[in-house]
Amino acid sequence: MAKVHIFNAGPCILPKAATEATRKAIENFDNTGVGLLEISHRTPGWERIMSETVQLWRDLLHIPENYKILFLGGGASTQFFTVPANLLNKKAAYLQTGVWAKKAAKEAKIFGETEIVASSEDKNYSYIPKNYTIPTDADYFHITTNNTIYGTEIKEDIDCPINLVADMSSDIMSRPVDVTKYALIYGGAQKNVGPAGVTFVIVREDVLGKITDRKNLPVLPTMVDYRTHIDKESMFNTPPVSAIFVMHETLKWLKDNGGIEWIQKRNQEKADLLYNEIDRNKMFVGTVAKEDRSLMNVCFVMAKGYEDKEKEFMEFAKANGMIGIKGHRSVGGFRASLYNACEIEDVQALVDCMQEFEKKNA
Ligand SMILES: *Cc1c(COP(=O)(O)O)cnc(C)c1O
């Protein structure tokens, strides 16, 4: 098979070291003679994987002890209602930067008053709103740091006068994060830290247990209450064993190679390479405000005058091994996701394709 270059938006490409270690563990986990898909989550070997995975998170992101790290099921979408269930006493504030953010705010409305502080829906979410005021009477302010579909990103940890909550599904572990600026961070693992099936939650413990005057669901169902999972170290019920294992191997790969500082530099190089080509090549044009460009999801379309070449480029890229570059239907064109495990060689291959296509057609 010819070399393929995976740019899928999620589930993401994973490091070879992680998939290889998983393949071996599926055959024989920790020299037990039992495969990863068949082990009990109560075996000592598994408990070691769990605690090492938590430690990898702590080490990589410098997460202080008063923050708890949970590995749950249900995807980021389940956190859309779990977050307000645990934190929304009276009112929540949301920054609407895309459909994921919108979906998150919709769930918050079930629990209480929800204010959309600012939205970029007027321009199809092609920028990050600025100069908005965060209401100080809200219980928390929710942001989506990377907007996977549109390719915009809040690349710095913002100052927030109230509890800050972030959906970091698609840029967690891609750059340094000052965790202490957040009350809670969550996301699905499948964009940057593992396969589908496990969701991470990083929560500052003191923000929990404050639901006192909410009429709707004042007592939380056991599984919805973060404190259940904190008490049992994410093993109140059967954890997603195999997905956590792959996450463990993915983070080990990240740490062994130099951690967040290393990956940020590499991610910046990859994004620069592709954005520079988009800006140089007369057949293509980027879709978002330059200052808000995501390092993870690069969105572009055919430039004016070349719109009819879209299908042709897609086929040309496919014939050259590019996988997953079709843009989301709400943006169109192309989207190349340059998650952590994507190599500079993959991006170079895409850039070569764009240059060759320009030579033939422009
Ligand atoms: C993919 C994605 C989600 C949804 O994640 P699931 O795990 O599929 O529920 C939520 N937010 C963002 C930013 C995403 O990229």
Image (cartoon, grey):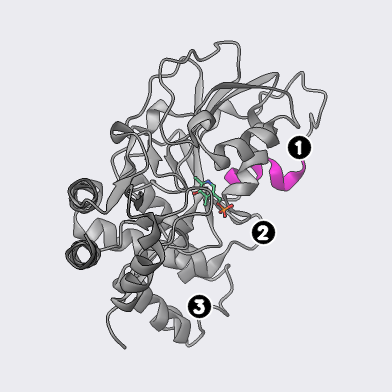
Q: Which residue is situated farthest in the right direction here?
A: 215
Rendered location of residue 265, percent (x, y): 18, 47
Residue 222 among those drawn in magenta: yes
Task: Name the quadrant of the C terminus.
Answer: bottom left
Question: Under tag 1, what secondary structure?
Answer: loop
Badge number at residue 52: none
How many angstroms separate mark 1 from mark 2 (CA)?
17 Å
How many angstroms separate mark 1 from mark 3 (CA)?
33 Å
- Residue beneath disc 3: 36
Badge number at residue 220: 1
Pointer 1: residues within 10 angstroms few (<14), some, or many (20+)?
some
Q: Quadrant of residue 180?
A: top left
**Residue 313 left/right relative to 263:** right
Badge number at residue 237: 2
Name the residue located 67 percent from the left edge and 59 percent from the top edge.
237
User: Is ligand 1 less than 8 Å from the beta carbon at label 3?
Assistant: no
Q: Which residues are magenta?
A: 221-231
Name the residue located 43 percent from the left edge and 80 percent from the top edge.
25
